[in-house]
């Protein structure tokens, strides 16, 4: 008959070993960041991460914010970041970040502590069925119910699942019985072996045959969505050999002679028809500009789509689909140099339209396009820029200045505004100085993350364009149809709030500045933030107040 305490000891030993081995496996595979939210049931996991020599564990009070911090870190580094939480509703707060990770092919590992398996379906406190919690939005779901599994080896495989092939999120559910706290802290386990290896992308061996299709043709290159950090530079060299103009979304753009800066305006004014290519070579997701992707959808020009995605072509206009990494594709030079005449025509048209845009933005009067241009020109080099969804990403696409020394990242998987501050904070926590350009509604949606920024002090500067509500809707049918009267529009879409984001930031302990002129704004964002001397001081925020969107004087054509 077992003596008193043997059952408790066995449970503690099981919890400790399971979580220690799992965390060690993550470290073996190269994971360096874990964002952990406070809770009781996940105590063994928290202690295991706290005792890891290789993984920095960061406490984040809000699980929804933690999910987006991990997302931002993973988007910046390409290495899976981990989130871990207690049982019950806490796990549901990861879903928005997991959906974005899924749609943007970002590696992320969500660990949810759980009550013992035998309590499922009993309505026990803080207990629900957490198996397959995220459904089709994760690449795979695992559960640590078996005590015979080698969880150090399994955790290493989980990281490889998240990172290899088409990257994405993975869910690990960890049922844990009480007692949850050991009599002594677990020993530190150090990394063993290498950091895993990426798989060779499919389709690369067939590239020479495809490149033959491009010879002696006028080629237009269109790149969209997110991309590997190496892709923009490789793309410029590849396009140069083809003498192909490049229309690239903000996350894939670089300052190269082939880059078309005014693609959105050129598309709006019919230049894509007058400069029609023989073939379009597309990389990744849709371009940001609706005018560009509408032309792709309706032009009838043959198109080759290269990308690693579980999704087919959403435009249904590609005549050939190639499952291959865009970066690996453009790393293979075509082996011939095309006639530059076609590119010269594009460059002449681009210079003309870009000049007109520059003249329109030269006024000292602050407008949202002018602010966007200043941000993309003035933020420090060798840093990252997070751009919010809704209007900021569209303005960067239309008015931003391409740069080779600035990494642009956005949540364009499902185009949500939620978690914008948290995503940018995750980027900064990965070690990359970061500037965020977001709207006021996005800032208010994630305002609680400002308290985490104040506490953590990451190298992050946030620029909020405050136009007092949902300005993007002023360009959409809700405003322009004539069917919806002004009161209903303002209540449900305009949503004016009258709040100062600088005051909200100040209440969280952040240094916040409200600027009124373009001169003040450029001075505020030019060069490194002077408040930054060490981790505890890395916090600042700028707010630029603009009139409601439909009242702004904007050099813009018809609505998007």
Image (cartoon, rainbow, N blue to C red):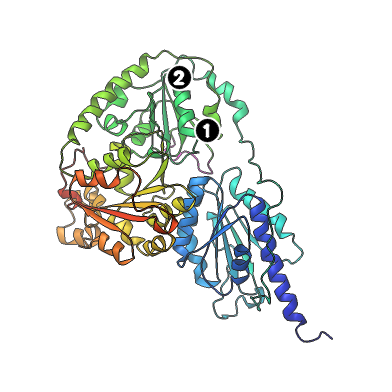
> Which quadrant holds the C terminus?
top left
Going from N to C along the chain, the mark reached first, 1 or 2, is 2
Left or right: 494 as drawn, with respect to 182: left
**Residue lying farthest right?**
1
Q: Position of residue 318 (x, y in %)?
A: 46, 32
What residue sits 68% from the left and 53% below the top?
191
At label 2, counting other C-alpha atoms closer than 10 Å, the crowd grade (few under 14, some 14-19, many 20 or more) is many
**Is the residue 399 above or below the residue 449 in the image?**
above
* Residue where numbered disc 1 is placed: 327
Quarter holding residue 226: top left
| The stretch drawn in magenta includes residue 315 | yes
- Disc number placed over residue 242 in the picture, else none: 2
Say above or below: 45 vs 100.
Answer: below
Decide: few, some or many residues near mark 1? Use Cα within 10 Å; few <14, some 14-19, many ≥20. Answer: many
- Residue visible at 48% across and 53% down in the picture: 71
Q: Are marks 1 and 2 in contact (CB under 8 Å)?
A: no
Q: Nearer the viewer, residue 168 or 33?
A: 33
Height in image: 389 above or below 230? below
Q: Is residue 486 left or right of residue 313?
A: left
Span of residues in magenta: 309-316
Element type where label 2 sits in the image: helix
Q: Quadrant of residue 43?
A: bottom right
For the stretch drawn in magenta, the main secondary structure is: loop
In the image: residue 222, left or right of residue 30: left
**Magenta segment: does it hold 491?**
no
Q: Residue at x 33, y 50 (%)?
A: 530
């Amino acid at each position: 008959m077992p003596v008193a305490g043997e059952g408790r000891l066995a449970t503690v030993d099981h919890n400790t070993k399971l979580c220690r081995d799992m965390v060690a496996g993550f470290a073996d595979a190269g994971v360096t960041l874990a964002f952990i939210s406070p809770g009781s049931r996940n105590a063994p996991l928290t202690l295991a991460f706290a005792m890891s020599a290789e993984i920095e564990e960061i406490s984040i009070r809000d699980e929804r914010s933690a999910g987006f911090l991990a997302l931002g870190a993973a988007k910046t580094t390409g290495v899976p970041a981990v989130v871990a939480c207690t049982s019950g509703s806490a796990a549901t707060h990861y879903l928005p970040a997991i959906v974005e990770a899924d749609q943007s092919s970002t590696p992320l590992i969500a660990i949810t502590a759980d009550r013992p398996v035998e309590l499922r379906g009993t309505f026990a406190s803080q207990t629900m069925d957490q198996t397959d919690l995220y459904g089709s939005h994760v690449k795979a779901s695992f559960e640590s119910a078996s005590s015979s599994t080698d969880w150090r080896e399994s955790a290493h495989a989980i990281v490889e699942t998240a990172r290899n092939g088409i990257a994405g999120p993975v869910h690990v559910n960890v049922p844990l019985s009480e007692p949850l706290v050991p009599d002594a802290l677990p020993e530190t386990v150090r990394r063993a072996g290498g950091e895993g290896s990426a798989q060779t992308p499919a389709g690369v061996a067939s590239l020479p045959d495809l490149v033959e299709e491009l010879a002696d043709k006028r080629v237009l290159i269109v790149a969209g969505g997110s991309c590997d950090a190496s892709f923009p530079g490789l793309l410029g060299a590849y396009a140069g050999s083809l003498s192909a103009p490049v229309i690239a979304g903000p996350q894939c753009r670089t300052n190269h002679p082939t880059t078309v800066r005014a693609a959105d305006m050129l598309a709006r004014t019919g230049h894509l028809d007058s400069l029609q290519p023989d073939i379009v070579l597309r990389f990744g997701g849709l371009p940001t500009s609706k005018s560009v992707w509408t032309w792709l959808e309706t032009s009838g020009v043959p198109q080759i789509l290269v990308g690693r995605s579980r999704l087919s072509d959403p435009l249904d206009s590609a005549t050939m689909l190639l499952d291959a990494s865009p970066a690996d594709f453009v790393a293979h030079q075509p082996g011939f140099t095309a006639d530059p005449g076609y590119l010269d025509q594009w460059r002449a048209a681009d210079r003309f339209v870009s000049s007109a845009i520059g003249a329109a933005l030269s006024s000292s009067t602050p407008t949202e396009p002018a602010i966007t241009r200043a941000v993309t020109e003035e933020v420090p080099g060798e840093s990252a820029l997070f751009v919010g969804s809704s209007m900021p990403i569209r303005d960067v696409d239309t008015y931003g200045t391409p740069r080779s020394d600035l990494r642009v990242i956005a949540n364009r998987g499902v185009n949500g505004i939620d978690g914008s501050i948290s995503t940018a904070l995750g980027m900064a926590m990965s070690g990359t100085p970061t500037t965020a350009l977001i709207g006021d509604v996005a800032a208010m949606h994630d305002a609680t993350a400002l308290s985490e920024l104040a506490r953590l002090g990451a190298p992050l500067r946030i620029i909020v364009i405050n136009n007092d509500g949902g300005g993007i809707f002023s360009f959409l049918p809700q405003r322009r149809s004539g069917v919806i009267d002004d009161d209903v529009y303002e209540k449900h879409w305009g949503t004016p709030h009258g709040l100062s984001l600088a005051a909200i930031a100040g209440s969280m302990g952040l240094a916040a500045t409200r600027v009124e002129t373009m001169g003040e704004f450029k001075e505020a964002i030019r060069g490194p933030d002077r408040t930054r001397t060490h981790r505890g001081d890395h916090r600042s925020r700028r707010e630029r107040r603009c009139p409601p969107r439909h009242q702004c004087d904007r050099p813009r054509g018809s609505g998007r």
